[in-house]
Amino acid sequence: MPEVYGIVCSSYQREEVFEKVEQVFARGGFLPFLHQRGRKVLLKPNLLSSQVPERAVTTHPVVVEAVIRLLHEAGFLVEVGDSPAIEDMMAVMKKIGLDEILRRYGVKPANFKDTVIVENPKGKLVKRFEVVRAFVDNDMVISLPKLKTHTQMFYTGAIKNLFGLVQGLQKSRFHLQFPERERFAQMIVDLYEMVNPVMSLMDGIVAMEGEGPQGGDPRQVGLLLASTDTLALDVVAAELIGYRVDQVPILKHAVDERGTEYRGNITLHGVSYEEVKPQDFVLVKEVSDIGFIKDRFPWLFAFARNLLVPKPVFLHEKCIRCGRCLQICSAHALSWKKTQKSQRVSIDYRRCIRCFCCHEICPVEAIDLRRRFW
């Protein structure tokens, strides 16, 4: 029976977070469970970019610290890491104060620079993944996601967080290989099944609503969720903010692989849905995937994509010319265009695959998503 444990946590005050994380670990019996799996633990927080913790872009460092402290006292050897798409991992850690926390506990940053090939024979789409070395250097992975919306996948949580085990710009290559949302979701599920995280703990104290995972707005939810069943945790979290499982492609594919009775067997302990469900949480508007049109009616695909799928539109007055969007665009749809005064980003919509990576990575929210019919 998939079980999820929730606990109300109203702030990021260290004493409160430490107490609540310890309580949820005790209620779930997680420490004895982890001791059976080994001693070396890789903690995988969401370190998307170097934004201050108050922006709710990353897993809050106090939540990461609470888990480090608990595992450290229990005798585990802990490493912490993530692979931001553009930025250096240590730069993000320094920005949010996580580097100081690691030094305080004698925890080393995980090796996310070297990569290894891991076979994935059970994968439906991807039979092998190139992932960071830290994955094979440790006995187990614990996902520490942030509760956020996501412009491409609608919701991002504990399963999507594992995409950070793919190194840096290699992530954008998967967007190019699987531009259709449903196939990209299946790829993420293949990765999740291969990684098989031993448990997950979600930072939902302050979540992100709207145009996440970076351009949305912080939203107080006041909740921590934990489970040894990462999919169950994501199902509970997504439904709490207002999604159905079938609206979130990653969850739909993963739940379908578990069978028809899986969702009905999930039990939430410690809190009730009515108690913690935020009202009027701003979701990403659901847009149908049109990949099937490309397969069956390729001549109609471009028209349908322009009609149904939003396009990235650059707000040049806000752009700081950092060039991150050009770095991450695997479709090579972006380039610099000289103007009389300086230069600006130009986009070739014929090449654009609507992965929204540029929108996701922009540090100043200078890219909007709009429907435009040309």
Image (cartoon, rainbow, N blue to C red):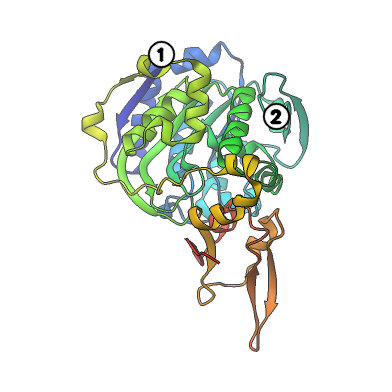
**Residue where numbered disc 2 is placed:** 126
Mark 2 is surrounded, within 10 Å at the Cα level, by few (under 14), some (14 to 19) or many (20 or more) other residues, namely some
Is 190 located above or below residue 374 in the figure?
above
Check disc 2 and report its element: helix, strand or loop. loop
Of all residues, the one furthest to the bottom in this rendering is 340
- Identified by mark 1, the residue type is Glu
Q: Is 214 on the left-hand or right-hand side of 24?
A: right
Q: Position of residue 22 (x, y in %)?
A: 38, 26
Q: Is 131 on the left-hand or right-hand side of 4?
A: right
- Identified by mark 2, the residue type is Val
Give the Cα distance between marks 2 and 1: 26 Å
Residue found at x 47% / y 36%: 157
Q: In which quarter of the image is the C terminus?
A: bottom right
Residue 261 numbered tag: 1
Mark 1 is surrounded, within 10 Å at the Cα level, by few (under 14), some (14 to 19) or many (20 or more) other residues, namely few
Residue found at x 50% / y 42%: 153
The quarter holding residue 44 reads top right
